[in-house]
Every structure is written in structure tokens, then in C-alpha cells.
Image: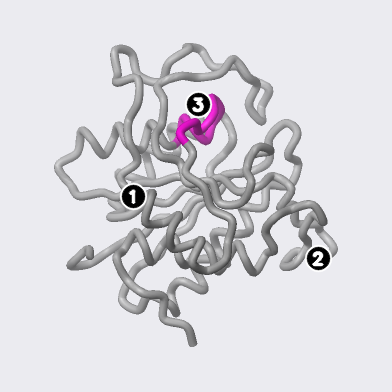
Amino acid sequence: MLNGRTTVLLTGFGPFPSVPANATSLLVPRLAEAARAAFPGIVFETRTLPTEWAAGIEHLYGLYEGLTPTVALHFGVSSRARGFEIEARGRNRLGFLPDAAGVFPASPVLRAEGHEYLASTVPVSAIVARLRRRGLPAFISRDAGAYLCNATLYTALDMARRSAREHRIGFVHLPSSLLVEERRPAFGVHPRCPLTWRDAIDGGLEIIGATLGRPVVRR
């Protein structure tokens, strides 16, 4: 269990090619609202990261330097997600793919001469077990892809590795079919999605609780 003043940073992403409505940008503020009631005394901060190679990473650096979070949980969407995919590691690579601004990465790696892989510092197995006990589909993933999700995870872990502060950093992929329609901003869910909107909030609370080493206080 973490002691002392704890700041938890929750981030989602904006839209990008093939995902014009990214549910994580709406999920994280709603999750933080629920988490403030479920985990008294914890400070929650939320941000939406731009889905751009340069701006996204630059924004991430600013958040870690300015907020100095004890815990950072980053959320993104993936067409391969079968439910909650808890990423076990980030990889020092970039796919030659356009970002939301149509720009391609300038390098095939995130950090020259950096480690090929960096392990997530959240209790991945414990998170998956806790989600499954709630009846939610949850899996350990060892491949965060080669897009901004992986870049965010690897960059955050690399910053933490070179910092003297204690950090717990993780990344959660949700199904890209968790699309939120404009007409139903709180409840719109794709019929083929394995998660409901309520599942996403409930599971998010369990992920936070497992990372903090605390039970979820349900009112």
C-alpha cells in the first residue's frame, strides 16, 4: 500500500485515424469522479493526451514534471482488446503510422540505446485477478502495439526509471468498439463490445484499487 500524499493521474486519448470518437477521453473524468468517492484522501488528476507523436510525448513529459504523480494509469483503445487488456510492458519502438495530424514518426525507436522493453510497475497479475473476480473480461497483454499507446507507456516508464521518486505506472487497453455516440454521451455502447459503460467504470475502480493496494469503497 502506498503511504503519504498520493496523486493518481488518469489519462485518455483524443481521436485518431479509424477512431473518430475515443471513449477514453470521456471515461477518465467520469472514472475520476467515481474514484474520489471510492478512495477518500487520494488526489485524482485527469488529462486527455493528443494522439500525435510529438505533441503527445511532449504533453506527457509536462504532466509528469508538473503533477509528479505517484500513480499513473493510461487508458487507450484497441481493436484487438477482448475486454480489459492490462499491458505488462512497453517496447522501444514506433510503427510507421500517421498520427491524428497525419504526421509519421521521425524515428523507429522512442529512445536511442534505450532498453528494448520496460516492465509496467503496476501489479498486472493482481489487477487481472481482481477484475475477473468481478466477472469482468480481463487479460495480461505483452504487446502494447506500436502506436501512441505503446509510446506513452514506454516513455512514462523510462521517465520513472530515471527518477528518484516512487511511481506506479500502467496502461489499460479497452475495446475500440466502446464508442460513445453524441446522442448518448454517457451510455452509448457498441452492441458487439464485451464491456458496458458501467463495466468500464467498475473495472477502472478495481484497477485503481489493486494498484493502490486498497479496497473500493462502494456507497
Work out which quarter of the rendered image holds the N terminus and state it.
bottom left
- Three-letter code, disc 1: Val
Give the number of the disc on residue 145: none
- At 22% across and 63% down in the image, what residue appears? 2
Mark 1 and mark 2: Cα distance apart in space: 33 Å
- At 45% across and 41% down in the image, what residue appears? 87
- Three-letter code, disc 3: Ala
Front position in the image: 105 or 216: 216
Mark 3 and mark 1: Cα distance apart in space: 26 Å
- Name the spot of residue 182 as percent of width and height, x first: 81, 58
Q: Are marks 1 and 2 in contact (CB under 8 Å)?
A: no
Q: Are marks 3 and 2 in contact (CB under 8 Å)?
A: no
Q: Which residue is mark 1?
A: 122
Which of pointers 1 and 2 lies earlier in the amino acid sequence?
Answer: 1
Q: Secondary structure at mark 1?
A: loop
Front position in the image: 216 or 158: 216
Q: Is 183 on the left or on the right of 17, as rendered?
A: right
Local packing at callout 3 (Cα closer than 10 Å; few below 14, some 14-19, many 20+) is some
Which region shows up in magenta? 142-152
Residue 209, by quadrant, is bottom left
- Say if the magenta span includes residue 151: yes
Q: Secondary structure at mark 3?
A: helix
Q: Number of numbered discs present?
A: 3
- Name the spot of residue 96 as percent of width and height, x first: 59, 15
User: Relative to 21, does residue 61 appear above or below in the rendering?
Assistant: above
Which of pointers 3 and 1 lies earlier in the amino acid sequence?
Answer: 3
Front position in the image: 16 or 172: 172
- Name the spot of residue 207 as percent of width and height, x first: 44, 60
Give the number of the disc on residue 184: 2
Which of pointers 3 and 2 lies earlier in the amino acid sequence?
Answer: 3
